[in-house]
Image (tube, helix red, strand yellow):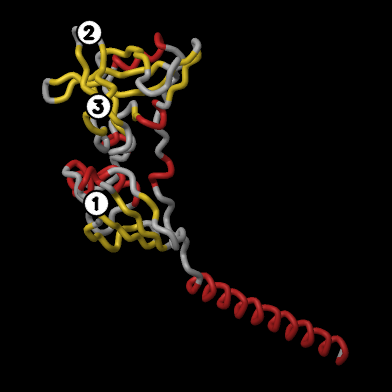
Amino acid sequence: MKQKLQIVLLLAMAVAGIRLAWVFYERHQSAVQREKPQAPPLNPDYYVTPKKFYIDDLKSARDLTKQPVWVKVGYVYPYYSYDPASRRAALAHEAGKLLPIQKLAISDVITQASASKPGERLVLAVFKEDGKAFAAPVGTEKSGHYWFYVNDMLYSQDPHELYRHWPPEIWQAIDQHQVKLGMSELQVNFAIGIGLLESGGDSTDRTLDYPNGGMPLIVSYHSGKAIGIHPGS
């Protein structure tokens, strides 16, 4: 009987010890979870997937006339004066460069011999701005083969809708072609066009030089947000 009591006591002590150890383990895990840094929320910009154009010849390129389009990258793509009567663009003299997220209502798509590359023709999208006609290259043709870069050049959807999760004050700055502290690199690109990366930067800290249509700016970023804005040279 004495031995049985000793065995029961030993079992009770073992069970109590196991329970106490489990309580300490749970408390330790709770403390670790509280101290563990929370992962930042995923950037909703990553989920934006603009629709693509499916263009491979002049006939399908004329689908660009069916709806407005918006310029993806500002101050990169040139445009030229266009004469509707002769249906020719003045390719020898650039009239300017398309602005960031500029809205275009393309009225026609034509081809015209390149001024610099014999045997090659430019595919030109015709549009009007301030009552004047212009044409911007959207591809090339040579020996019956076409190459288009419209998916790199244009949005088929209004960027205001694609990125409607951005705050109204951000869109107001973008529409006024202004840069504000705290803007992302994509938002700055929408406001003032493409920038050139300075050497020595990395994914966390980087500085870009923006030509900005002749009004250059230098913007510094930390973790993807603008932390410094200075005039460029």
For the residues marked 2 and 1, what is the alpha-carbon distance in whole angstroms? 37 Å
Q: Nearer the viewer, residue 125 or 178?
A: 125
* Amino acid on which disc 2 is placed: Ser
Q: Residues within 10 Å of mark 1 (few under 14, many from 20)?
A: some
Could you say whether the residue bearing mark 1 is in a helix, strand or loop? loop
For the residues marked 3 and 2, what is the alpha-carbon distance in whole angstroms? 17 Å
Residue on which disc 1 sits: 216
Q: Position of residue 70 (x, y in %)?
A: 28, 30
Residue on which disc 2 sits: 86
Please tell me which of labels 2 and 1 falls first in the chain.
Answer: 2
* Amino acid on which disc 3 is placed: His
Q: Nearer the viewer, residue 40 or 139?
A: 139
Relative vertical location of residue 163 with respect to residue 158 in this rendering, above or below: below
In the rendered structure, the answer to whether residue 33 lies left or right of residue 154 reads right
Q: Position of residue 157 (x, y in %)?
A: 32, 28
Q: Nearer the viewer, residue 52 or 60?
A: 60
Residue on which disc 3 sits: 93
Does the CB distance between marks 1 and 3 fall below 8 Å?
no
Please tell me which of labels 1 and 3 falls first in the chain.
Answer: 3
Q: Position of residue 25 (x, y in %)?
A: 62, 77
Task: Please name which of the two marks, 3 or 2, marks the residue nearer to the observer.
Answer: 3
Which part of the image, by quadrant, shows the C terminus?
A: bottom left
Relative vertical location of residue 61 with respect to residue 51 in this rendering, above or below: above
Quarter assignment of residue 79: top left
